[in-house]
Amino acid sequence: MVKGVKRSLLCDLQNEISYYVPSDISHAIDVLQAHSIAETKELNLVSAKIIDSTIEFIVTNNLGHLLSRQSINKFPDINLEWDYPAEITNCIIDINRNSDFDFSKIFLELESLGCQDLQLRIEDSLFIHEIENILKYADGRMLKSIQLYVANNSSESDEGYIGLVAKFPRITNLFVFNSLLSKVLTPDTAPAYTVARIADRIDFKRGCGIVHPDWFVTTMEHFTESLKFNTCLNRKISIDENGVIRNCPSLGTSFGNVKSVTLTEVARMREFRKIWKVTKSEIEICQLCEFRHICTDCRAFLEEPQNVRSKPLKCGYDPYTNQWSEWSKNPLKLKAMDFYELGLA
Amino acid sequence: MILIVGQNGDSSTHEVLRYLMYWNAPFIKISDLDTIDNVSIQCTNRQHEVTISKDSMKVNLSKVSAYWYRRGNLVFQYKMNATHPEIAESEIHDFVKKEYSTIANYIHYCLEQIGTRIGAFSKNNINKLIQLQYAKEVKLLIPRFIISNNRKEVQRFYNDVGTLATKGIGNNFTNLSGQSYWMFTSLIQQKDIDRFSEKFAYTLFQQYVEKEYEIRVFYLHGKCYSMAIFSQQNPDSMIDYRRMRAGRSNRTVPYNLPKVVENKIIRFMKKCEMNTGSIDLIFTSKGEYCFLEVNPNGQFGMVSKPCNYFIERDIANYLKEGVMKNE
Ligand code: SF4
C-alpha cells in the first residue's frame, strides 16, 4: 500500500492491478495488519463501520482471506528487495546516415554487460539492406529483444519491412514512421513480432518522458526497483547518432564517445551511476503521490528545469487534488516548456 | 567449472545462468537439444577419466566441481544410421541402445558423485508410494489411502473416511496418441462409487482432506522456501490448483512454515536422498499440516517470483561457491 497525501494506492502486484483507497480505509488496513478483526474493533481506533467495509473491500477483491488469529505470524511481509543479474538492462541507440561506429564491438559489449533489450532508432530513410548491415552484428548475440524504429523509405515496400523482421528473430517490433498511413502490417495471429507503419514523424529526443496512467507498471520488479532506484534510468545506457554515451538520449550530460571509451567503462563510472539512485522519495511532489512506485520517472524534462529534485514536467497529475490535467496546457508549465523548446508546433 | 543439465527454453534455468554470467562464473549447459557426440571413458590402474563432448566442447567430469541436474536427460548420438545402415532398424540396434543407456546411467552416476550438486537424474522418478511411506516415518501427517481394484473395498473405505480423492499412482501426465493429458485430482462421492464396476484397474484412493490453503515448499539443501496458495474461493481449483482457469489466479504469498514441520521436511528429504525438490502440503481446516507429494524437479520460478525469494540467485550462488570451495 502506497500512501499519498490525500489517498492511498493498494497495489496487487500479483495480478498487476491497483486500487484507490481512501485514507480511513488505509488506516484500517494498517491496524488490521497486526490485529485480528475483533481486536481491531476493541481498540476503537477505527469505527466498526469502516472496519466492516474494509474487510468487504479486501475479501470481494480477492486481496485477502479470513483466517484464525493464530495465522497472523505465519504470513510474513513480502521481501521488497530488487536485484537483477546484469550491469545494464537496456540500451537505446540513435542512428542516422552518418553514424559510423563499430556496431560489432558495441553489441558484443552490451552482451557482456548482460543487456537484454535494445532499441534502435533510425532517423534517416535508410534502405533495408543498409539496416540489415547494422543488424547482422546483433545476430548471435545474447539479446532478448530488439525494438526498431525506422524512418520510412518510400522505395521500400510493406513486404520488404516484414521480410526484414522475419530475417532477424530478435526483433520484437518494427515501427516505420513518417509513413503515408498508420497501419499494422502483421496480422493479429502473427508470429512473435509486430510490424506497423506510423504516419507521424517522431521526435524521439523531445517526445519522451510522458507520465500517464497508460504507462504505469504494477509489477513486482518495477515496484521494488522504484524503492531504491530511478525507474526510468537505472541500469540503462544510450548512444546517440554521433556516438555520444548518455544515461538517456534526452539528457544533456555526455560521458564520452563510443569511439574513444568503452560502454563498460562508462557503465561503471560513479558519476554515470549517480542518477540511477534518484528515487521518487527524493523528488518533490512525487514523494507525496500515491502513484510513485508504479509510475515511471523522467529526469530529462523537469517542471523546474534548474531544480534536480523537481517532478517530471510531462506529468499532469496533482496528488493534492487527485486530478489529472493535460500537462502541456497547464499555464504553470509554460516556462519549463520554453526552456526545453517544447513548443506546441 | 559448473555443469548444468536441463531442458531447453526453461526460463527459470535461464535466469540462474544469467546470474552465473553476471558473476563471471564459468559454466557449461547441456540441454535436450544438445547431442553428446563423443564419450570417452578410460579406466586403467593409473587413471580414471570420463569425458563427454558436444560439438567441439569437451567436458572432463573430473574438472566439474559443481553440478546442477535441473531436468531432462543427456542425449547421445547413435551413429549407427550412418555407419551401419543395414542394422539401423534391426534388433541389434535395440541391443546397442541398451548398451548406451548403461553408459548414460554410469555418466549420471559419476555426475552424482560431484561434491557440490543440486538435483539428481536418478531421483527423477521417485515412487509416490515410497514417498508417502517416508513421510509417515518422519511423522508428517499424510491422508489415509488405499490402492484398490474393486468397488467393495472402496465402499468400505468410503464408509470409514467419507469423501475420497483420486489421482495417478505414478505419473499425473500421460501421452495418448500424441496428445498430452494431465491427470487431475478428482473427488469421489457415493454416487460415483455407485457407478463403479465390480473390478477395475488399480487406482489410488485418498481420504479427501479439507484444506484452509495449500503450501508449496521449494527445498534446497536444507532450506525451505514456502508459499501459501489460496485456492478455495476459486471453485474450479478447489481440488487441484493446477486446474485453474486462465485470468483468475489464486493468491500466492510467502509463508512461514513452523520449525517443527520444516525439520520433518528436512528429515524426509534426507530419507529420499534428495537435496532439492518441490513439496506439496495442505494446511487442513483442522489446523494440521498434511503432506501430499514431492516433485523432484518442480518449477521453482512459480514460488520464487510471487514471493520475491530470488531462488534463482540462491541456486546460482550455491553452484558458484561450490566451485570456489573445490577448485
Ligand atoms: S506526481 Fe510524480 S509520481 Fe505522481 S504521477 Fe506524476 S510523476 Fe508520477
Image: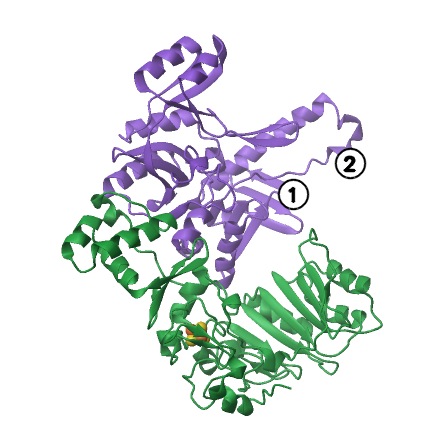
Q: Residue at x 70, y 75 (%)?
A: A200
From the viewer's perspective, is residue B261 above or below residue A165?
Answer: above
Chain in green colour: A
Residue B127 found in image quarter = top left
Q: Quadrant of residue A197?
A: bottom right
Mark earlier in primary sequence (2, 1): 1
**Disc 2/disc 1 C-alpha distance (Å):** 16 Å
- Does residue B206 appear in this view? yes
Residue drawn 40% across the image and 54% down it = B314
Q: Secondary structure at mark 2?
A: helix
Instruction: Residue B191: give x, y in percent of width and height.
Output: 43, 16
Residue B128 appears at what percent x and percent y? Answer: 42, 27
| Residue on which the image places disc 1 | B35
Residue B270 seen in the figure: no
Give the quarter of the figure containing the C terminus of chain B. Answer: bottom left
Amino acid on which disc 1 is placed: Thr
Q: Which chain is purple?
A: B
* Depth check, front residue: B271 or B160: B160
